[in-house]
Amino acid sequence: MGQVILTDRFAGVDNVLEISIVTADGDHVIANPYQNGDLFWALRGGGGGTWGVVTSVTYKTHPSKPLSSVILLANSTNANSTQNILTEIIRLTPSLVKQGYGGFGGIHAGLIVLFVASPNVTAEETRTTFHPLFEFVALQPDVLVVNSTAVYQDALSCYEAIAPFLGNVVGIPNEISSWLLPRDIVETDRPGDLAAELLKITHPLGYL
């Protein structure tokens, strides 16, 4: 049911209340925890197109809250610098999650993108948290870097701000696969080893 920047706090599947679907045999079915429960469970994990054509989804909503956000763009032409930056991001990930941050990142052809946001912290706290990372990246050789922090009044304004960085995501014939990294893999005392393994992936790498 989708990944969003605050999936860790407001996971899409956990907020789905009901799904309406037309199954392969042409039946229009309502699936929720009380009827067609097996189908409801499968739809939330296997994707709508796997089991039929989803015609509507009912979500539990949450009050809008300001989001304190960070964006980091680093263009690296140095393999060691690229690995150092990814290593530092991995090292910080557990503490960022505990502070309520969620987001996405990616690496492709030396371009590193990281965007995170949290509804639980002030702008000053965000600047304090990420200043060491900004300084660390700026000290890496052969890296051009742009970074900033910002506060958005709600999730929609936050999305509108980052949409230009996402490009045209409609009508692209791509198939996306993912790995779920267990917490103990990310909470490692050797983040450089994990970074090195992830960088062996030859296609664009996403980190969420």
Image (tube, rainbow, N blue to C red):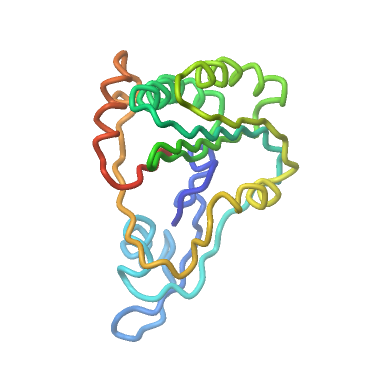
| Left or right of residue 171, residue 149 in this image | right
The correct choice, above or below, for 158 with respect to 191 in the image is below
For the N terminus, the image quarter is: bottom left
Q: How many marks?
A: 0
Residue drawn at point x = 28 percent, y = 34 percent: 198
> At x 72% / y 35%, what residue is drawn?
151
Q: In front: 82, or 39? A: 82
Using the image, determine if residue 131 lies above or below residue 55.
Answer: above
Measured as percent of width and height from the top left, residue 92 is found at 46, 21
Closest to the observer, 54 or 108? 108
Residue depicted at 45% across the width and 38% down the height: 111
Q: Quadrant of residue 5?
A: top right
Percent coordinates x, y for residue 179 in the rendering: 29, 42
Q: Is residue 116 above or below residue 133?
A: below
170 displayed left or right of 160: left
Identified at 24% across, 35% down, the residue is 200
Which of the image's four quarters has the C terminus?
top left
Q: Which is nearer the eye, 201 or 125?
A: 201
Residue 187, located in which quarter of the rendered image? Answer: top left
Nearest to the observer: residue 28 or residue 172? 172
